[in-house]
Amino acid sequence: MTRIGSSSRRRLGRRLAALIATALALATALPAGAADGPATAIYVPKPNHGAIEQIAALRAAGRMGDADLIASMIATPQAVWFTQGTPAEVQRSVRATVKRAAGKQQVPVLVAYNIPFRDCAQFSAGGATNGDEYAAWIDAFAAGVGSADAIVILEPDGLGIIPWYNPFADRDTWVTNPNYEWCQPAEADPATAAADRFEMLNHAVAALKAQPNTKVYLDGTHSSWLGAGDAADRLIQAGVNDADGFFLNASNYRLDAHLEKYGTWTAKCVAFASNPASWGVGHSEWCASQYFPANPNDFSTWGLTDQWYTDNVESQTWWYSESVLEHFVVDTSRNGQGPWTPPSYPDPQDWCNPPGRGLGVTPTTDTGNSLIDAFLWIKIPGESDGECTRGLGPAGSTVDPEWGVVDPAAGDWIGAMALDLARNAAP
């Protein structure tokens, strides 16, 4: 093992501090906005300690370029996740974060991730134990934000994974789907679990929007998950019309061009299915999506779905205008190279610590699209998605063949993937 003397450590520390300070200055000097005025400077939080250790190890090994890549990555604005704690604890933590951000004249991106049956007991299992506990936690979260400026990403996967959910149940008699989705926890009541999820999210939206300077976005999944109509239906039930919009691609790898179309369709479907003047009110299941008439595997066909919205939504000129559409934000933290096409595994888990991916567009509110409020780094690049086994064995002991190690738990640092993302950044 190479040992570093105290004077070398001091030099290393000064060099690292200077590098991060320079990167911070570059990362937070976001471009000026277009019609909406100056772009917002987004908060750069303290980095994962694993990143600091990786930078030190790379420098000690003489790999200065790689160390600089990681240092620049962690000095880029990204979200702060709140996943546990008592109401008093989360209120203190949120308050401290927004105070630090305000001191830097930056706006923090705060992820609230504590809903009961979170991730349906998968890699990111946890959350509050019941609705009352969650309501107390989210109320305290909101109190921690107070009057500060903040962007809140409300419960990633919260609408993509709903316990005991039956999409489009109790609609027209010709719409039949008697099957619950895959998330069926034994501890949840099948008769009430889905309704409870929507009730909790509506409460959370109300509590957060009671704060004067908080922007709140709900889970819209991504362009290779829910269809636009299904996403719109869930968003409406969760209270999106009282929020600031929805977020896409959290912790995923979908391409910006696909997400822009999908988000626009979802926004139009929300308006189509929730505006009392629309002939489609109450019928998000009628909305076109990436699955029909488009082919989800052929992006050149997605113009067919664009045309459906032109013909069936934009044509409703007695109520439709872009001003009635919900806005959205996009997680670009790891989508610079798009999704991974895995080799043949029993369960490829293409979303879980895939190799060969890259950092995407750096965070900004100057997006060039009037419906996209911001490109954000919601997922912290370099933090593990969980113990990816590719279906080859049990978690905790199965080596991930893509990395040659047992992957760290969700949220822990995975240095090889962090460096992969930094090297493959696009742009």
Image: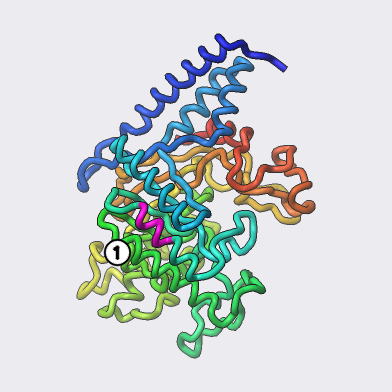
Q: In the rendering, at what x and y percent does residue 259 appear? A: 44, 54
Numbered range of the magenta stretch: 138-144
Furthest residue to the bottom? Answer: 173
**Circle 1 residues within 10 Å: few <14, some 14–19, many ≥20:** some
Image: 120 above or below 67: below
Is residue 319 shown left or right of residue 252? left
Label 1: which residue? 325
Q: In the rendering, at what x and y percent does residue 24 appear? A: 39, 29
Furthest residue to the front? Answer: 88
Q: In the rendering, at what x and y percent does residue 407 appear? A: 69, 43
Query: Which residue is drawn at the image coordinates 29% and 35% (left, top)?
Result: 31
Is residue 207 shown left or right of residue 35? right
Q: Secondary structure at mark 1?
A: loop
* Residue 143 lies in the magenta stretch: yes
Q: Main secondary structure of the magenta part?
A: helix
Is residue 397 shown left or right of residue 39? right
Whether residue 59 is visible: yes
Query: Which residue is drawn at the image coordinates 56% and 48% (left, top)?
Result: 339
Q: Nearer the viewer, residue 95 or 121?
A: 95
Quarter of image, res 153: bottom left
Quadrant position of the C terminus in the picture: top left
Q: How many marks?
A: 1
Query: Which residue is drawn at the image coordinates 52% and 29% (left, top)?
Result: 70
Query: Which residue is drawn at the image coordinates 22% and 73% (left, top)?
Result: 319
Quadrant position of the N terminus in the picture: top right
Q: In the rendering, at what x and y percent does residue 418 appear? A: 57, 35
Q: Amino acid at mark 1?
A: Leu
